[in-house]
Image (spheres, rainbow, N blue to C red):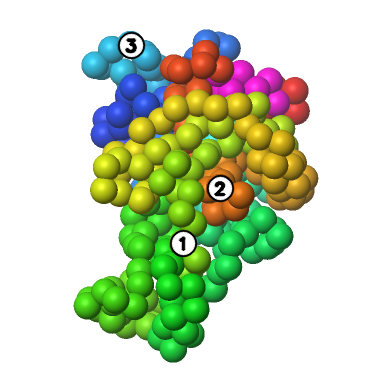
Amino acid sequence: MKIAVVMDPIAEINFKKDSTLLLINEAQLRNHEVFYIEPKNLFFLGKEPCALCSKISVKMDSNKWFFLKEENQIYLKDLDVIFMRQDPPFDMEYINNTYVLEAAEKEGVKIFNKPSSLRSFNEKISILEFSEFCTETIVTSDKKIILKFINKYKEVVSKPLNLMGGQGIEKLNLDQDDLAERLTKSTKNFTEKIMVQKFIEKVYEGDKRILIINGEPSEYAVVRTPAQGEFRGNLAVGGKASIEKITQLEFNIASSIAPKLIERGILIAGIDIVGEYLTEINITCPTCFRELLDQKGINLMHKVFDCIESI
């Protein structure tokens, strides 16, 4: 098959940890023809969805982990499969790229994850569809509503709706001298909605990333434990990863979400659980494949490609 991967500049990744590199390597091992597309290089030529792309080969054990051939212009309809692995921010440029990919989808190309779902299934707000698994939550830009919520629950966490890797996430309480300044900044002067949730103390024990491939939850979770002085367990901000078998409760949460993911054409997802609570459903560019492989010898990219090869 001809498989393309839309991803941020490959020269800037951490090749020891990057999940998309593992995806490309798996495609390569299965003798697929693999193409590399940077997000800025998706475009329309008239009504035709196109891209500037390069054939790519990769290595998993070298400081030179990728090799690109000459860049060429292609029609996306000439590809069989495209993986959308562009990192947030989920901004208008991201949304515009989903329109290009959706046009290719209409011409018969398999796109993972489905472009319309990338637009409509916000990684933060989507958890509210499964509110029975969520802690107390509001989504608003209104100052009075936010302050009333903080007053009720004393300690809360605020989250931007369009970022990743722990960016912009803050722990808030009414005793902070700069609380008004923080809220003004995070809401862009109370014009942009944020998510605010009751603080979950068990976050210090780590948050768990459970990968779900084609509706099947992984048997093991990647536990991301915050660094000293931090409450965010995200690996991008210094969290430490370990592997644990998922609990029955975590399996029940993942299994309840899985059918909705399949309905929406979401092949690869990563849900985050803190204590007993669902905190995020990551579908843009889920990570932690490498931690499972490195620490437990589990390569979930096998399942990913088993799925696409059977379609």
Q: Residues within 10 Å of mark 1 (few under 14, many from 20)?
A: many
Which residue range is magenta in the image? 299-307
66 in relation to 202, above or below:
above
Residue, far bottom: 144
Element under label 3? loop
| Tag shown at residue 61 | 3
Q: Is residue 306 visible?
A: yes
Task: Tell me the chief SS of the magenta region.
Answer: helix
Where 184 sits versus 137, above or below? below
In the displayed structure image, the side of residue 184 where residue 216 appears, left or right: right
Q: Hey, which quadrant is residue 163 in on the image?
A: bottom left
Look at the image and say whether residue 240 sits in the magenta stretch: no
Using the image as rendered, state which of residue 269 and residue 247 is in the foreground. Answer: 247
Which residue shows up at 58% across the image and 68% down it? 136
Q: Identify which amino acid the numbered label 1 is placed on.
A: Phe
Q: Mark 1 points at which residue?
A: 199
Residue 1 at x, y percent in the picture: 61, 21
Image coords of residue 66 (percent x, y): 32, 20
**Is residue 302 located in the magenta-colored stretch of the structure?**
yes
